[in-house]
């Protein structure tokens, strides 16, 4: 695929201050290792308005014009890089490299921004205790869902029973733990309360359930 370098170089030629010393057609042909007709064809292809000198109307070329001709010939040549790079050509290569680098940085920043939520979740999960309560779990997940709604969601997905106690298979899987605590009523009667807490493994499982629910919504 031919690169659109010629147009860029021609724009530089228009704004470039012509140097005092210029090269003739024959000199350019000798430097590039091609014949004069090849130079003339490149000039015609680029639609150059070059300076002419003497009664023979010999064409004179600046460094910018020689660079444009060199690139034009290389674009139509089987062999790339006919001669060592001119100063102007080196500048163009540097500009292109800087542009590519800027695009790569932008792409990496985009990837980082996409990975950041997952990284934050992993950090919060790993820095939590062995078990956390459902309310804390809702905060860690940061899915715009509170404690009560999370309880409801887990009941609807048959993870928790009607009394908010996990089904046994989820306890056996290491997702939840049920903590028993005794308390005494004013009349002296002793009762037992059950509280569901979540292991780190369970937080990851709930996160997966919530993400899947969003995808299927």
Image: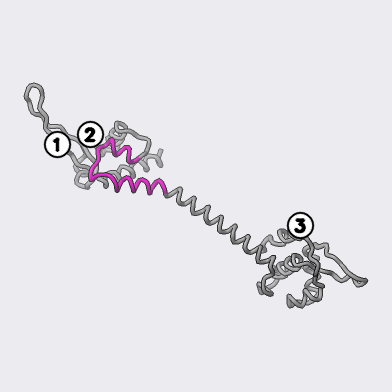
Say if mark 3 contacts mark 2, CB within 8 Å.
no
Residue 24 location, quadrant: bottom right
- The answer to which image quadrant residue 36 occupies is bottom right
| Residue occupying the far left of the picture | 188
Q: Between residues 51 and 199, which one lies in front from this camera angle?
A: 51
Magenta segment: 116-141
Question: Along the horizontal axis of the image, is 149 left or right of 77?
Answer: left
Viewer-nearest residue: 3 or 166:
3
Q: Quote the CA–CA distance across marks 3 and 2.
A: 76 Å
Specify which label sits upstream in the sequence, 3 or 2: 3
Secondary structure under the numbered disc 3 in the rendered image? helix
Question: Which quadrant of the structure image shows residue 166?
Answer: top left
Which residue is drawn at the image coordinates 30% and 42% (left, top)? 206
**Image quarter (top left, top right, bottom left or bottom right) of the C terminus:** top left
Which residue matches tag 1? 180
- The dot on residue 164 is 2
Q: Position of residue 62 (x, y in %)?
A: 78, 67
Q: Badge 3: few (under 14), some or many (20 or more) residues near its Cα, within 10 Å?
A: few
Task: Pick out the residue farthest to the right.
Answer: 55
Quick check: 102 left or right of 202?
right
**Residue topped by disc 3:** 15
Horizontal and vertical percent position of residue 138: 31, 37
């Amino acid at each position: 695929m031919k690169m659109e370098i010629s147009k860029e170089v021609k724009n530089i030629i228009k704004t470039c201050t012509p140097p005092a010393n210029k090269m003739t057609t024959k000199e350019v042909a000798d430097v590039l290792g091609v014949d004069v007709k090849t130079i003339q064809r490149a000039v015609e292809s680029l639609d150059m308005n070059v300076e002419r000198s003497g009664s023979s109307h010999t064409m004179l070329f600046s460094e910018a014009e020689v660079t444009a001709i060199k690139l034009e010939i290389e674009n139509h040549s089987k062999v790339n890089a006919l001669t060592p790079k001119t100063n102007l050509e080196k500048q163009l290569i540097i500009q292109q490299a800087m542009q590519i680098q800027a695009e790569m940085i932008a792409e990496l920043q985009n990837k980082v921004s996409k990975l950041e939520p997952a990284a934050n979740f992993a950090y919060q999960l790993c820095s939590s205790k062995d078990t956390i309560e459902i309310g804390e779990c809702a905060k860690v997940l940061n899915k715009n869902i509170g404690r009560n709604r999370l309880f409801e969601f887990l009941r609807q997905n048959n993870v928790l029973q009607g009394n908010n106690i996990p089904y046994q298979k989820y306890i056996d899987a290491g997702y939840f733990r049920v903590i028993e605590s005794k308390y005494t009523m004013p009349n002296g009667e002793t009762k037992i309360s059950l509280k569901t807490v979540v292991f780190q493994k369970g937080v990851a499982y709930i996160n997966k359930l919530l993400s899947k629910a969003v995808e299927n919504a």
